[in-house]
Image (spheres, rainbow, N blue to C red):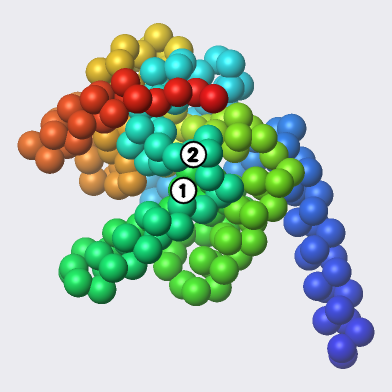
Amino acid sequence: MWKKIKQIIFIILILNVVFIAWGRFFNPPITFTQIGGLFEYGKLQRDYISYDEMGNNVKKAVIASEDQKFFIHDGFDYKAIEKAMKYNEKGKKIRGGSTISQQTAKNIFLWQGRSWLRKGLEAVYTFIIEKVWTKDIILERYLNSIEMGQGVFGIEAASEYYFGKSSQNLSVSEAAWIAAVLPNPKKYDPKNPSPYLRRKHNWIMRQMKHVSLK
């Protein structure tokens, strides 16, 4: 029995190594979150594109919104995590401290949820992809796989869905609107923005001025 368990563990480890190596060169065929969106909304709208095909405006907007230290941290923003933990101890709403690298690890390899098991696996995958992939690859995988609406995944599909154009042609304002729906794209809609979303949109545009794609 123990021998079979070790064999299963070994096979799982090998498959993970292969998948991580694959991910350095290719976008994922499908993710657990995309499968969930397909079942929930009956559609899977996505369009994987390369890093160079993505417009700089949308890259800057998402980094400004989600993780302004992306290019300088090692996958974890410890100050943001500490701040989120203190906030969650006091507040009723849960605030996350996840970096783009952590979200990429979750989106590509894992499932949605807040269990300790998933968070632990997320930390492991984050550490590995930071070592094996480059920052540009991580950002490309993130921008291609992130949920951007009901059954809409990736910034290219979101650009077409919300503005009828490629992400490469988004204006600063349009890119900021797309980034503003994160991290709750099922709730917020750039086509019908709430007062909160308008404030966040304006804040992202101001922050974009300080983002460098290095």
Three-letter amino acid code of the residue under disc 2: Phe
112 w.r.t. 148: above or below: below
Q: Tell me what residue is drawn at x 24 percent, y 25 percent.
A: 206
In the rendered image, residue 17, in percent from the top left (x then y), is placed at: 79, 53
Q: Tell me what residue is drawn at x 67 percent, y 35 percent.
A: 134
Tag shown at residue 99? 1
Nearer to the camera, 120 or 75: 75
Tag shown at residue 70? 2
Question: In what element is the residue under mark 1?
Answer: loop
Q: Tell me what residue is drawn at x 87 percent, y 88 percent.
A: 2
Which residue appears farthest toward the left when viewing the image? Answer: 195
In the rendered image, residue 211, in percent from the top left (x then y), is placed at: 39, 26
* 19 on left or right of 127: right
* 182 on left or right of 116: left
Let me know if residue 168 appears in the view.
yes
Nearer to the camera, 59 or 211: 211
